[in-house]
Image (cartoon, rainbow, N blue to C red):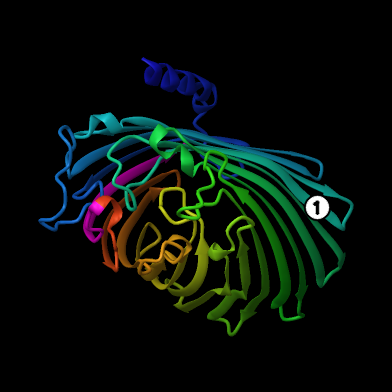
Amino acid sequence: MLKTLYRLFFFLWLCPAAAHAIADPSDIFQPYISETITYNDNLFYRSSSPNATPLPSGASRDDVINQATVGSAANYTLGRQKFTLNLSVSDLSFANNKFLDNIASNDRAVWQWQFGRQLSGEVGYAYTRAMGGFTNTTFIGLNMITGNNVFANLSYTWHPRWKALTSLSWQSYTNGASQWTANDQQYTTAVASLNYTTPSNNSFGLECSFISGKYPNRQLDGATLVDNKYQQYNSNVLLTWKISEKTSFSGKVGYIARLYPDYSQRDFGGETYDLALNWTPTAKTMLAFSTWRRLATWTDVTASYVLTEGFSVSPMWQVSTKLSLTAKFSRQTLDYTGDQIVQGIPTRQDTVMNGQVSLIYTPVPNVEVTLSYLAGKRDTINPNPPLNNQPLDYLVNSLFSSIVLKF
């Protein structure tokens, strides 16, 4: 009943605008609906090893998921001020694992302000509600993760080629399942950067950031050195470079230090980078290559942080004005250095590979049809002991199709 009322309320909210059905990019209010059907042959990302514990009664390894979404994008300009509002709500229904049925949401409101010619910025709020994934947990149940993000940023351009930026944000992630409340997170991020743009429209700059994070429901544990707060410092050199008419580069290289005030054994310090190269050999083809070394904080893993290193290759072919073909292959390693070292056991390391190919058809400007296939694989080294004594390798295949209608 709650789901029905939620959908009815949202449809009624959209109906007055949808009745006009004006498909124009300049619309200040554009509602849309979409339908996505997905088949996944390993929904819970379980190992095929005979040593893997069978799924509990009522759970199925494969499933067909139907996701119905309604949403809208609203833009309103008042002088130099611009207000945007993006709302969407999705109803997800599982054919086999009915206990996972849920309603998800993704909403964002932003005020883009400008004062004079030199000062501009944004103030906004974002809300998300989505089901937690299964790639790194043996929990077979519904865990709805709620995210809140309040943010503001300021840009000061005192010279046509020089720009200073600063931002402040607060984020929180709350787990709905009682088994995962210890992974609830809250963190505040402050960023400052200085950028210079050359006459040839290349740019370089410096960026510094600070993060203060905590796990409000996690208790200090001296036996395993489990901590509930941290501070993180980042410094990066930024560069964007148009190498030629067909090739461009963007990236950042820096150093990160993550400190745990109660248990310094968890501290991390090391180099990080995010690099991307785009090549457009013809007007209808593009090839994107990226590589990275990042420190990631996850809400559904046993480690407080994971060091990821990898690369991806993404080709694109615009077959015609209405049809495009895209693909992406990625490979990355994940080192669970945060927990494993302090427990005195071998460091767990995962190798994860994913490949996806998508066919996108746009018969008219306000209709988009997508057909995609995704394959994924994970191999794990030194899971000693494995998570809840479960093998952690997996193979997964997924096929999905979607249609989006914009009004």
Of residue 81 and residue 3, the one placed in the foreground of this image is 3
Note whether 196 is above or below 230 in the view shown. below
Q: In what quadrant of the picture does the N terminus appear? A: top left
| Amino acid type for the residue under numbered disc 1 | Ser
Read off the magenta span.
Answer: 389-407
Q: Secondary structure at mark 1?
A: strand
x%, y% of residue 317?
37, 69
Residue 36 colored in magenta in the image:
no
Residue at x 42% of width, y 73% of height? 310
x%, y% of residue 154?
79, 53
Residue at x 14% of width, y 45% of height? 54
Of residue 312 and residue 368, the one placed in the foreground of this image is 312
* Extreme residue toward the bottom, this view: 244
Q: Is residue 390 left or right of residue 193?
A: left
x%, y% of residue 93?
29, 32
Q: Is residue 269 left or right of residue 373?
A: right
Badge 1: residue crowd in 10 Å (few <14, some 14–19, many ≥20): some
Q: Quadrant of residue 242?
A: bottom right
Residue 405 colored in magenta in the image:
yes
x%, y% of residue 51?
13, 55
Of residue 55 and residue 132, the one placed in the foreground of this image is 55
Q: Is residue 177 visible?
A: no
Of residue 257 and residue 396, the one placed in the foreground of this image is 257
Note whether 137 is above or below 91 in the view shown. below
Note whether 390 is above or below 20 in the view shown. below
The residue that disc 1 covers is 120
Residue at x 48% of width, y 78% of height? 279
Q: Quadrant of residue 195?
A: bottom right
Q: Is residue 354 visible?
A: yes
